[in-house]
Amino acid sequence: MASIHLKNVGKRYPDGNRAVIDLNLDIADGDFMVLVGPSGCGKTTALRMVAGLEEISEGEIHLGGELINDVEPGKRDIAMVFQNYALYPHMSVFENIAFPLLSQGVPRAERRDRVERTAAVLGISDMLDRKPRTLSGGQRQRVAMGRAIVREPQAFLMDEPLSNLDAKLRVQMRSEISRIQAELGITTIYVTHDQVEAMTMGTRIAVMRKGVLQQEGSPEVIYGQPANLFVAAFIGSPGMNFVTAELSRRGDDLVLGIGPQELVLPPKTLAQRPALLEHESGSIVIGIRPEHLSLPPTDNSAKLKATVERSEMLGAERLLHVSISAKPVSADEIMEAAEEVSAAAPAMLQDGSKGDEVALIARIDPSIVPQPGSTVELGVGLDRLHFFDLESGRAVL
Amino acid sequence: MVDQVSGPRGRGRSLNKVPWLIALPAVAALIGLRFLPSIVGGTFAFTDWNGADANWIGFDNFFAIFRDPTTSNALVHTFQLAGLLVVICNVLGLMLAMSLRTAFKTRNLMRAMFFLPFALSHLATGYIWQYIFQYSGPLNRILGAAGLESWQLVWLADPNWAIYTILVVLVWQYTGLTMVIYLAGLEGIPDELHDAVAMDGASPWLKFRKVTLPLLAPAITVSATLTLIYGLGAFDQVLSMTGGGPVNATETLATQVWQNTFVYGRFGYGSALALILTGLVAILSIAQVSLLRYQETRL
Amino acid sequence: MRDRYSRKTLIWEVLLLLLAIAFCLPLYLLVSISLKPPQELFTSPLTFPTDLHFENFSRAWQARNSGGMASAMISSVIITVGSVATLIVIGSLSAYAIARRPGKLSATLYTLFVIGIIVPFQLTVLPLFVLFRSLGLIGTYLGMIILWVGILTPLTVFLYTGFVRTIPRDYEEAARMDGAGLVRTYVQVVFPLLRPITGTVAILTGLFIWNDFFASLIFLGGSGRETLPVAIYSFVGEYLTQWNLVFAAVVIALAPLLVFFLIAQKQMIRGFSGGIRG
């Protein structure tokens, strides 16, 4: 078991394309690091460079303090679980799991012993004689895990290992992988495009976009203190609401002008985010998560008038779609993050937010059933607001 | 052969690359046993080498080939056989393939029966057919039994008919191959497409012309090219059935190459014939492939 | 709809089956005549023999032309197996490199191999004959195997390359991660994955070599190591008009392939279509 350090790592293709740009990551021993981002963000390339399957064009990768740039993948003592599992179809489950040991020249008796122990951990002991094609998706997933675990490697790499499973199995395997990783305490890098997987599995999350690391931190930090518009929009489902506001000072108070409505910020907001002063009498993007819009508003929260469009009943909660009159935000970052949710999402975003209308989503109690077309007052958790620079997209702190 | 290894962190540094070295034996076989001998053989074609001295005689061999009725007729027979074989085999093979898509109970058995002649030695089966075409053989006997005495011919000794007996054998032998290729092609057409066409109410002929045929274009290319090559190179069947006779009526380029080179020892002349055969195969198969590719893209 | 079995289907099936039987009629003739006494050959060529004359087979088997049928069968087996095995080894290795090292060199080699498929054997036969004679390879098994490797390597590489390209690299990458070197990766992971196309290659090239007459006639004629088709040719030259003996010899020559076809006809047909598609 070992820590992994990526120092100024970059991937440059002969045609000049750069898949990964100046990536720095410190992954401590035993961490479960999730690399997350939309397709083409460079997360898989980064993983493959750690694996040794891709040349490292720039920078250094250290495993357990040792530079491994020029070490053969098989000698790095890293195991990998592939997206399609890459189980050798002509070998039985036993032979698949035993293959890494065979390559390392582990004696036959010990091989059998270790494979059986691994199979027991994964609950596949009764399938050792079967061929991969006779297994279900979940069972294959376990065999792939088994092939990685059996080596007791310094680190695990996983490339979207759950993407071929159906939704229910995915949830189950999510916790299973987390459990196994925690039990073994093996440093893990896990690549996914699914922010839910990232949030539920990672002890650390690194969000990437267009080859560049956007933010790295614990799930709490990534969710609660996104460093920029992209991270804010990408993490969370439904995503964060964004609206353009005019920031102005009235006496000692900072006032946010959202369309015709105004929200007065409490003094402690400015104390927490002194940089807001730089945006005084200018435009700023504010973001608020659906769960911080309340209906009915709590007594001491600020209020925002909105028109109810429709609502989605999800069982334990209700997603209320409303519109307010304000200036929408149409930054690339948000569009790209929205695209990851569904291809049609950016169009919907723009449809919902035409001209001076902005669509918002609130997460409310399912017993409250507002009528479409009616006007409601939403409570706004002012201390939960996020502020972003309109130009750079960076969080204003 | 060349494994790019530059500095430790340089671009193009090869991690895990398959070494070119392992391609060497096959490349050596290709060059040493195919390309170099082809070039040497092509060179022989312009000499009068017959085992002793060889003199450069330019295109004389080729002029002689076109003047000599045996070889020029062999050229004509080769065209005849190849042309008819391509058309007949592909039409029959396609019809069989389409028929054998139906869920018949004996479908697999029938596929095997039609394919069997292709799998068997062409020389050996040629002898069976020689017997069938004998004057007192089964074919004439059947014709006689059917009251068609006037149709009874000395098939193999009739200069007008002998070439067609060979065609019959070639068709018999290669139809199964085209059928298999078309079956594979038809399997590649998704069922949804057939369903969609059926829903559109298209007539079977329209369906065939507008859907099946265009989507079969790659299979047609392969099948037509293969039968063309087999037709141009016909040798075993000729040698076992007629030996080129009667009066050279069934000589083909391939039999003439063999006869001139290995029976008469006219190495230069034989090589010139082989070069013509090579040219025909190259030109016709390239023409056919590009024509069919053009159709493929147009559709 | 498409798969309903109606009366019309039945009639259609019967008609096609009759056609298929007619197609195989020459083979019925072959077997029936190989078992007939000479006097029945032309009096009743179509009927099945009144009593079975198996001695035709023993006479054909014992005929001593070209070393006899037994020796021809041994030659055919040695040459076919030796050539196919060599082709599979060098063809799959070369295709592996071509498919896994994309670039100019790979594209050029691939094109050259495709050209190599089309060049007719007739053009190369004389130079090869001269070369083999000077090397003492005429009339030898080794010479024949080298000859076949030369003729069929292009087709083999072509078929393998197309197939390797369809195999995801993940398997090889997984093997490398598992610590397997190039040799182990190829032998234990890649080559087993090539099994379907290896079957196709073996069937296509094996059939071609087993049935070949032209090359074998030229390179083995008179050596005592003739393959079956050449042995049949010289047998016919000697026993022509003794059709029952000729056909007995032909049956002996075709028998191994016929048996193989009966066992493996499905794989054979699939192999063919697979190779052609792949």
Image (cartoon, coloured by chain):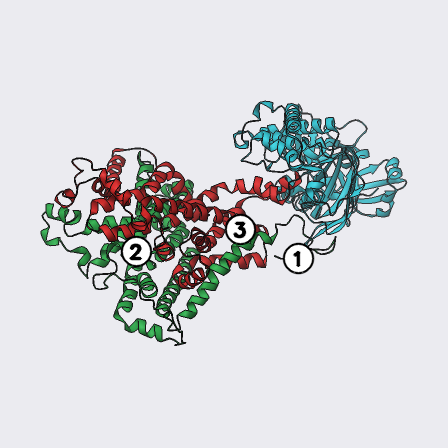
* Residue shown at 60% from the left, 33% from the top: A96
Residues marked 2 and 1 touching at CB (< 8 Å): no
Label the red chain with its letter.
C
- Whether residue B100 is visible here, answered yes or no, is no
List the residue tagged with mark 2. B85
Q: Is residue A109 visible?
A: yes
Q: Residue at x 65, y 29 (%)?
A: A111
- Where is residue B159 drawn, in percent x and y? 19, 61
Q: Are marks 2 and 1 on the same chain?
A: no
Chain identifier of the residue bearing label 1 in the image: A
* Residue type highlighted by circle 3: Ala
Image quadrant in which the N terminus of chain C is located? top left
User: How far apart are the alpha carbons under marks 3 and 1?
Assistant: 26 Å
**Mark 3, residues whose alpha carbon is within 10 Å: few (<14), some, or many (≥20)?**
many
Looking at the picture, how far across and down is residue A113, in whole percent? 65, 25
Q: Which amino acid does the dot numbered 2 rest on? A: Leu
Cβ–Cβ under 8 Å for marks 3 and 1? no
Nearest the eye: A248 or B277: B277
Quadrant location of residue A270? top right
User: What residue would you read off at disc 3?
Assistant: C95
Q: Chain of mark 2?
A: B
Chain rendered cyan: A
Camera-nearest residue between B97 and A374:
B97
Residue at the disc numbered 1 = A15
Q: Quick check: do tags 2 and 3 share a chain?
A: no
- The residue mark sitting in front, 2 or 3, is 3
Tag nearer the camera, 3 or 1: 3
Kindly state the secondary structure of the residue where label 2 is placed.
helix
